[in-house]
Each structure stands twice: as C-alpha cells, then as structure tokens.
Amino acid sequence: MAFIVVLTIKMIFAWNPPTAGAPGPSGQTLYSDTNHNIGIGTLYPNSKLEIFSTSSDSILELSRGPGTTTSTIFKVGVDTAFIIQNQSTDMFAIKNGNVGINTTNPNEKLTVEGVLSIKESDIAPSTTSGYGKLYTKPLDNYTKLLLHMDGDNNSTMFIDSSLTPKTVTVYGNTVIDRARSKLGVASAYFDGTEDYLSIPDSEDWNFGSGDFTIDGWINLNNTSGAQDIVAQYTDANNRMQFYNTSGTLNMNFLVGGVYIANYYTTDPVLSAGTWHHIAFIRNGSNAYIFLDGVSQLLSSLATFGTKDMGNYSGDLTIGNINLASYLNGYLDELRVSKGVARWTANFTPPTSQYSASGLFFKSSSGEEIQL
C-alpha cells in the first residue's frame, strides 16, 4: 500500500516598523506600515509602494551590469520625468504630459528627435470620430505609367514614377510648365504643333481582355478637331486611341481594320481653359468615361464584350498619334493602370499626386491628404 503525504509550509516575511521617534522623511530608508504599505523615504506611504525624495535627481533607478560597471535602464523622477535609457542614452521620456523619443525635453504631445519610420500598409486606416490618422502606403502594381509632369520650368525631363520606370522621349517643344498646374508644381505643355511624348512599346500596354484605366488631368487651349491624349499606333489598321474630338471624349481599338471596341461621350463634355479630370475605363464588358468624377453617357460602334483589345507594336505616345492629331494644351498627373478598373461609380477626383510611396493623413471625415 502506498501513501502520499502532502506537506504545506506557509512562510511569512515580516518587516517590523521602527519605534516612535525614528527618522522622518529625510532619514527614513525603508518603512512598512500596519496596512502593509511600503514607503521609501517616507513614513506615510499612501499606496503599496511610495517613494519620496526632495532631490532633483532620480528617485527610482533600475540598472544592470556586473560589479560596479552598470548601465541605467530607466529612471523616474529626473526633473519630474519618467525616462528610459539604453547605455546611459536617453531613449524615451514622459514629461509635463508630453512624450519624447530620443529626447528628454519634449515640447509637444509627441516629440521625435531623429528619423521616424512608418511601415507601409496596403490598407488605409478606418476613420475615427474626432481623430486624424497618419500612415504610409505604397503605389500598387497596377500602375504601369505615372507622369507627375513636375520639374524645373521649361525642362524637357519627364520622369515615370511607376514601380517599373520607363524612358520618356520628348519631341517638338513639349516642356514642363510651372506657370500652370493642377497637382504638384507644374504640368506638361503641348503647343499643338509637333509636340508629343513617346514611351517604348511594352507588355504593360497590352491590356488583352482585362480591365484597365487611363486617367489624368487635362486643360486644353481649345477643343477643336482631333487631339490625342494617349495612343499606340502600329499602322492604319491597328491602333488604340484615347482622345478628344471637338469636346467629345473617345476611346477606340482597331485591329485588322475593324473596330473591336469604340466608345465616345454622346455629347461634347470638355471645355477649353479649364482643368478637367478624365478617366477611360474597362471593367469586364463595361466601358466608362468619367469627366470630373461623373460617369458620362456613352455611345458606341463596337463594345468590349469579352474581346481581347489587341497587342500593338508601336510606341505609346502622349499628345499625338502617328504624327497627327496633336494636343494643344496641358496635361498633369497622367496614369496608365493595367488590370484594374479604378472607378465604376461617380467619385471625387484626386486632390493630390499619386505616389510610389507616400505619407498620408486621413481626417475624421475620411478625407485622405497626401503630405
């Protein structure tokens, strides 16, 4: 027969308080009262642990290290602050209701001395009533061409800010013009006579049967005649175009001399001398042309259906097609997106530039502002 014996030992640690007349706050080292509160530097602890000091030095300090070689981990009470240190370097402080990182003298609710890193997120934060939110987000992989049209005045250097930057070649007198812009500090100016930009052929312009979006800002000097915005031309029987004709916005795809898709706004919608946001979109079998965020009534000679839009071999041109139909006016923040329909319902046009990686602020109302 086996027996199990359970032995319980209760251990009590007792601290006997000093007798009356013991040193007061200036001399008391450690004190435990009858309520089991512990005081350091005080005979009258009001909580389980209370530390009192009249010195401006730290009243609580935690250190580590062998022997006499120590490094402070944190200190409390230095100039009425809570401080965390690393190898005697101040890393974090709370003082007068302010928080400091790498500084012990924060002058705002949050003061950072040094570089602040924010991890990018593909998902923008939700809105919270009464609070704004700061965050970063990257450019998505759908963006195949992104021209901010910024730079020095009269510069001919146009930079593609997409994740796969392409070379942009300038023809005619196309320049960056800082006198007029919609977003950023400048726009691209085309004088209507042999001005255009050219980007080499790429698989990125082969939309196939998938979704796409061409969008940007346009300000024409006049709307007369045909003025191409974006085009790709192989020959007279094979081309794609996004263009204006006397105020009407058009997009068409011609393969083997036959329109496989052709859409245009039923009425003229563009006006001269005014910035307009335009967007040409395919979403499945549906076509959209937006002007200033409003979907326009469309007419068509051929519809998308499930058709492949063709793979053209010429350069992508901005401001003309095959040395004709030259644009007369300004373009800003032009973007080509493959594989996505950016909008399928009315929307508020962007108020800031698209960015490869940007810092954004979202207000409590949901407005997103790029900083």
Image (cartoon, helix red, strand yellow):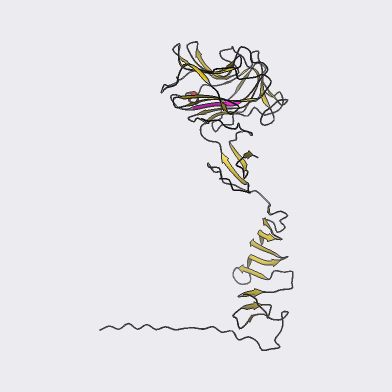
* Residue at left offset 65%, top offset 76%: 46
- Where residue 122 sits in the image (x, y, percent)? 53, 41
- Where residue 246 sits in the image (x, y, percent)? 61, 14
Give the number of marks.
0
**Vertical side of 198 occupied by 23: above or below:** below
Residue 332 is inside the magenta segment: no
Which residue is nearer to you in this view: 49 or 118? 49
Residue 215 is inside the magenta segment: yes
Task: Give the left or right position of residue 265, taking residue 171 as reference.
Answer: left
**Vertical side of 286 occupied by 117: above or below:** below
- In which quadrant will I find the N terminus? bottom left
Task: Give the left or right position of residue 246, taking residue 208 as reference.
Answer: right
Which image quadrant for residue 138?
top right
Task: Give the left or right position of residue 344, taking residue 225 as reference.
Answer: left
Q: Is residue 87 visible?
A: no
Question: What's the magenta bit mostly, secondary-structure-wise?
Answer: strand
- Where residue 213 sits in the image (x, y, percent)? 52, 27
Which residue is nearer to you in this view: 249 or 118? 249
**Vertical side of 356 occupied by 295: above or below:** above
Residue lying farthest left? 1
Task: Give the left or right position of residue 258, taking residue 136 as reference.
Answer: left
Q: Is residue 245 visible?
A: yes
* Residue at left offset 56%, top offset 14%: 321
The magenta span reads 212-226
* Residue at left offset 59%, top offset 47%: 118
- In which quadrant will I find the C terminus? top right
- Where residue 62 sits in the image (x, y, percent)? 62, 68
Which image quadrant for residue 161?
top right
* Residue at left offset 63%, top offset 71%: 68
Which residue is nearer to you in this view: 300 or 148? 300
